[in-house]
Image (spheres, helix red, strand yellow):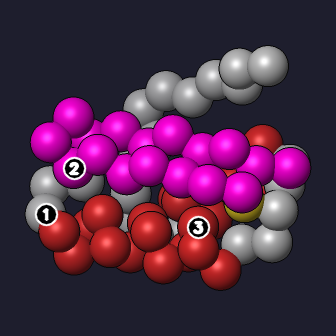
Amino acid sequence: MTCSACSGAVERVLGKLDGVKSYNVNLEQQTVNVQATAPFETVLEKIKKTGKEVLSSKVVS
């Protein structure tokens, strides 16, 4: 994510995704933290559909 439009696109898809409890998009650090009951792969797919590349990801219990 390099601009507010990029981060806005990620926020929009996460906001519409069932099972997402909360999320934090940090444009400066180019990170997204998601708390969700939705499957991990589903969240990743939705983010990738915005055209953004996911460089790393992990599940934290």
Which residue matches tag 3? 14
Query: In the rendered image, is residue 41 in sight?
Result: no
Vertical position of residue 4 compared to residue 37: above or below: below
Which residue matches tag 1? 3
Circle 1 sits in a helix, a strand or a loop, which is it?
Answer: loop
Q: Give the percent coordinates (x, y) of residue 46.
A: 63, 65
- What amino acid does circle 2 point to? Leu
Nearest the viewer among 7 and 22 is 22
Query: What is the C-alpha distance between the residues marked 3 and 2?
Result: 15 Å
Circle 3 sits in a helix, a strand or a loop, which is it?
Answer: helix
- What amino acid does circle 3 point to? Leu
Q: Give the percent coordinates (x, y) of residue 4.
A: 17, 68
Vertical position of residue 58 compared to residue 21: above or below: above
Write the residue at 86% across / 50% down. Answer: 37
Number of numbered tags placed on the structure image: 3
The quarter in which the C terminus is drawn is top right
Which residue matches tag 2? 27
Circle 2 sits in a helix, a strand or a loop, which is it?
Answer: loop
Query: What is the C-alpha distance between the residues marked 1 and 2?
Result: 7 Å
- What amino acid does circle 1 point to? Cys
The answer to which of marks 3 and 2 sits earlier in the sequence is: 3
The answer to which of marks 1 and 2 sits earlier in the sequence is: 1
Is there a contact, CB below 8 Å, between mark 1 and mark 2?
A: yes
Write the residue at 60% across / 45% down. Answer: 34
Is there a contact, CB below 8 Å, between mark 3 and mark 2?
A: no
The residue range painted magenta reads 21-37
- Residue 20 lies left or right of residue 10; in this view the side is right
